[in-house]
Image: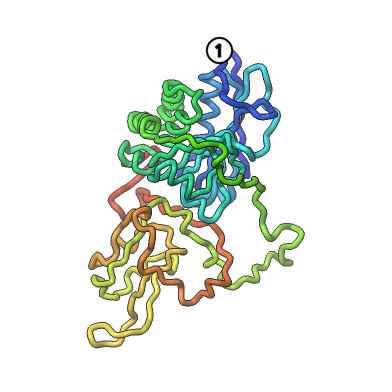
Amino acid sequence: MSKGQARSNRGHGATSVLPAINEDQCYEMRLESIGGLGANLCGKLLGEIGAYRLGLNAAAFSSYGSEKRGSPVKAFVRFCASDREILCNSPVERPHLLALFHHALARTMPVTAGLGKESTAVINTASSPRAARKELSLAASTVYTVDALALARESKSRVNVVMLGAIVRACGFIPLDAAKKQLTDTLGKKYPTMLEANLLGLTLGFERTSFEHFPPDNAPHEMPFEAPTVRWGYENAPIGGINPHFGNSVRNDLSPSRQGVIPLFLPEKCIHCGLCDSTCPDMVFQFTEGEYRGKPAMLNRGLDYLHCKGCLRCVDVCPTEALVRGEEREHGELHHFVYNKDLLVTDIDFTPAGADPTVTGEAYLDEKREDGGWV
């Protein structure tokens, strides 16, 4: 599914100078994210800033599948001078600027594909630009990093406005004041009570972004961009739409859809009551036969983190605090990771998709969020 939006610059004054253009005379951006982080809106805001504030012609559109939180989302933005028309409406394959809203997507999807040695990358991560470039094998010669989730919580805004501030700084031709004015005209009207927080988030994203330039000759090999494909289509789908894979729902690898928090298991506090298993929507907890306090019992051995989406319902329901909330980036090695005993894991081709773990007003936790930001 694609959503498109194009803006004309007619009557908006002098045209800003683009730092680079391709063979179509356009400066192009690609935003890689998951549903719920606001990349679609961020792309639209960038297009509107270019058209309404900078005197450019601009086009912004997004591509996504099931239109649900947690599923992969791509947003594309193009700018060109006011005396030219944007005639290309295909996805951005070789972006001048790539923004990765969700670092974990790189585990299972080629989100950095098409990034050239002269490109700029903006990554939502707590790592340094050098560490992020090495970890993701980025060909980009300039890398910006920003801890957008932490800054969103600090400002009580959202990840997308923090990333917007980082992108504005990284691209070099969008003034911060222009972004603030457009944010005021759009989100300020829809979420007036959140305007101050969103403007703060935008400013923090701009000011607290780190960057580093790297020699082009020291760049990794570029990864070519390929359009996403699926195994089944109208030509080879099973007759009658029958899915022959029994228990196919367990094929989803939900780890890319987590947004920074996970449940941590403290076995010494566990009383093996099973409340975590009863509240878990994804069969994460693994129990085996054993003995507890001298009696036969089913013992909790740990979690299958491949299927944990980070909703933290288990943390809320645990009566002994054997399950606690943790920042995933602080736990590179997930202790008590136990594969689901009912699955032949080595034979499963995991699909990088899943539900969104972001806490909302309907969740069990004290930390709540509405569409406009954290409350």
Q: Is residue 327 left or right of residue 306?
A: left
Dividing the picture into quadrants, the one containing residue 272 is bottom left
* x 36%, y 84%: residue: 289
Label 1 sits on residue: 14
Residue 13 visible in the displayed image:
yes
Residue 132 in the image: x percent, y percent?
45, 45
Residue 63 drawn above or below residue 170:
below
In this view, 11 is above or below 171: above
User: Which class describes the residues within 10 Å of circle 1: few (<14), some (14-19), or many (20+)?
Assistant: few
Q: How many marks?
A: 1
Q: Which quadrant of the figure contains the C terminus?
A: top left
Above or below 93: residue 265: below
Q: How is the image coloured?
A: rainbow
Question: Which secondary structure, mark 1?
Answer: loop
Q: Quadrant of residue 163?
A: top left
- In the rendered image, residue 94, in percent from the top left (x then y), is placed at 63, 38
Residue drawn where x is 43% and y is 41% of the image: 129
Answer left or right for 333 relative to 256.
Answer: left
Query: Hey, which residue is sitting farthest right in the picture?
Result: 235
Amino acid type, label 1: Ala
Q: Is residue 252 left or right of residue 149?
A: right
Q: Residue 344, image x and y in percent? A: 54, 75
Which is more toward the observer, 75 or 244? 75
